[in-house]
Image (tube, rainbow, N blue to C red):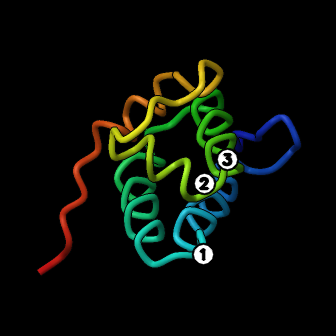
Amino acid sequence: MQDLSAAGEPLETRRKRLRFRAWHRGTREMDLLVGSFADAHLAGFDQAQLDRFEGVLLEADPDVYAWMTGRAEPPAELDHDVMRMMRAFEYAPAR
């Protein structure tokens, strides 16, 4: 049986959609940072974590960048496990 999201979307389709959104943020720096995070973690996220990640993707790039790099603290409603994972993520460019 296929695992479906609350909206009836297959879980794997949702992961692919979120990965695409993570890699198409609008600036190359954010594409690399958020996209690489998505590649590393989305496969292991459950529905609730995917919901929280999608919520972060709705935020403005400068804010997400500041939170991920530790330049600013995320607001209380975004201070959750996924944001902590994003803040701990260490981007390493491919060589």
Which residue type carries mark 2?
A: Arg
Work out which residue is located at the far left of the displayed protein and give it.
Answer: 95
Q: Choose top left, top right, bottom left or bottom right for residue 72.
A: top left
Q: CA distance from mark 2 to mark 1?
A: 19 Å
How crowded pointer 3 is (Cα within 10 Å; few <14, some 14-19, many 20+) is rated as: some
Check contact, mark 3 vs mark 2: CB within 8 A: yes
Please rate how many residues cluster around mark 1, counting C-alpha atoms within 10 Å: few if below 14, some from 14 to 19, many from 20: few
> Label 3 sits on what residue type?
Leu
Q: Quadrant of the N terminus?
A: top right
The residue that disc 2 covers is 15
| Amino acid type shown at disc 1 | Gly
Residue 91, numbered circle: none
Above or below, 91 against 7 in this view is below
> SS at mark 3?
helix
Q: Residue at x 59, y 41 (%)?
A: 53
- Residue at figure coordinates x 33%, y 38% from the top left: 70
Residue 11, labelled with which disc? 3
Distance CA(mark 3)–CA(mark 1): 25 Å
The single residue placed furthest to the right in the displayed view is: 7
Q: Which residue is mark 1?
A: 26
- Residue 12 relative to residue 8: left or right: left
Residue drawn at x 34%, y 53% as measured from the top left? 40
Query: Is 63 above or below relative to 52?
Result: below
Residue 19 higher or lower than 27, as above or below: above
Where does residue 93 sit, x and y in percent of width and height? 20, 71
